[in-house]
Amino acid sequence: MNEITRRGLIFGAATVAACGVLVGVERVCLSAFADNQEPDDDPGPVKIVKFSDDGARLGVFTVPKVRHTKAEWKNQLTELQYDVTRRAATEFPFSGALYDQHAAGLYRCVDCGNALFDSNSKFDSGTGWPSFWQPIASENVREKKDFSVGVLRTEVNCALCSAHLGHVFTDGPEPTGLRYCMNSAALRFILRGSAAQEKS
């Protein structure tokens, strides 16, 4: 039994290390080729659902897309936020500030403030990234096929500014069976109502 446990521990550690190496290689490659990215193919305007910070739905609005130059994005974002949202990099698992966040609140796009996810749909996927079984409104995200690492995946982007958020997979919990695996660096968490007042 001890031998089996030891083997499991070794294989588990090796798997986590390999995942970390792959994420690191992906970030280096994306940084090297970032300036060759294709321009945004959706010039807008876009329809999104707006939400107040306490999660109340304000309605559907047609708004212009948020667009900035690379220099403006770099000035607004941290290096990691820029790599993740504008270069489609991936943060290391268990390294983000929000993967273990369990408070009630709203998750907005760090680039443009668009409401993306509610804490009511967040779950612990064990992957080391914030995971949700649905977006706060389907209009607020865009999904597209991604073959960048040699495997077909579905990339998730902010509908308002085209920021890369992460990927969606079909191994999530009910009721949707989906796992929106997001990067903490792409999200800004807004603590909800009474919990926010208690902290202040």
Image (spheres, grey):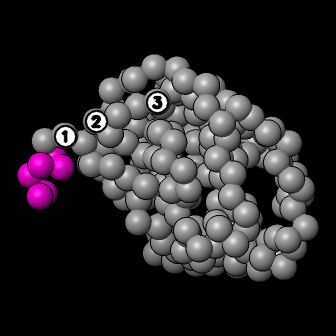
Q: Is residue 132 visible?
A: no
Give residue 47's position: percent from left, percent from top.
Answer: 63, 26
Which three-letter amino acid code belongs to the residue tagged 1?
Gly
Which three-letter amino acid code belongs to the residue tagged 3?
Lys
Give residue 43's position: percent from left, percent from top.
Answer: 79, 39
Residue 53 is covered by the magenta coloring: no
Within-10-Å neighbours for mark 1: few <14, some 14–19, many 20+: few
- Circle 3 SS class: strand
Q: Is residue 167 above or below residue 46?
A: below
Instruction: Return the residue at label 2.
Output: 54
Q: Earlier in the sequence, mark 2 or mark 1?
A: 2
Quarter that holds the C terminus: bottom left
Task: Report the front residue among 45 and 41.
Answer: 45
Within-10-Å neighbours for mark 3: few <14, some 14–19, many 20+: many
Q: Earlier in the sequence, mark 3 or mark 1?
A: 3
Residue 50: numbered disc: 3
Q: Alpha carbon of mark 2 to alpha carbon of mark 1: how far?
A: 6 Å
Residue 193: numbered disc: 1
Q: What stretch is highlighted in magenta?
A: 195-200
Give yes or no for contact between labels 2 and 1 (Cβ–Cβ under 8 Å). Answer: yes
Within-10-Å neighbours for mark 2: few <14, some 14–19, many 20+: some
Task: Report the front residue among 118 and 86.
Answer: 86
Q: Who's the residue at 42% across and 41% down the image?
A: 122
In the image: residue 110, left or right of residue 120: right
Q: Is residue 114 above or below residue 88?
A: above
Q: Who's the residue at 74% across and 34% down the image?
A: 44
In the image: residue 193, left or right of residue 184: left
Disc number lying in front (3 or 2):
3
